[in-house]
Amino acid sequence: MVKAYVLIKVDSNDVNKVANAINALEEVENLHHIYGGFDLIAVIKTKNIIQLKEDVIEKITKVKGVSETSCMIVADED
């Protein structure tokens, strides 16, 4: 199992709409609004790195309003 934190920058004023769309993805374990350089942080769990790539790049980045993502893969998952 692979776990990652994905920072998400939103380029629209409707952060809640973007958050709802991302939170609806089955791979999203948690989603939080944050302050700083990014607007949202998602906790993603997938079976492997390939699925993580597909989930992050092909799903999250295609949500209308998402302008940038940054993915941090957890190294010490128990």
Image (cartoon, grey):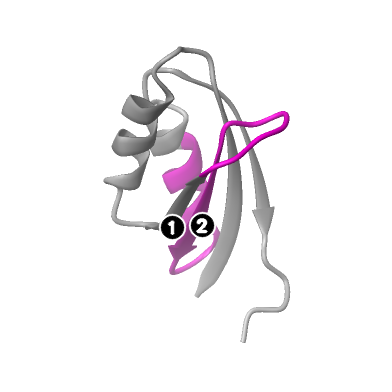
Cβ–Cβ under 8 Å for marks 2 and 1: yes
**What element does badge 1 sit on?**
strand
Marking on residue 55: none
Residue 4 forms part of the magenta stretch: no
Q: Quadrant of the C terminus?
A: bottom right
| Residue at 30% over, 37% down | 20
- Quote the CA–CA distance across marks 2 and 1: 5 Å
Q: Residues within 10 Å of mark 1 (few under 14, many from 20)?
A: few
Q: Nearer the viewer, residue 77 or 14?
A: 14
What kind of residue is marked 1? Asn
| Residue at 46% over, 64% down | 45
Give residue 58's position: percent from left, percent from top.
42, 35
Q: Residues within 10 Å of mark 2 (few under 14, many from 20)?
A: some
Mark sitting earlier along the chain (2/1) = 1
To which residue does mark 1 refer?
30
The residue range painted magenta reads 33-57
To which residue does mark 2 refer?
43
Number of numbered tags placed on the structure image? 2
Farthest residue toward the front?
A: 35
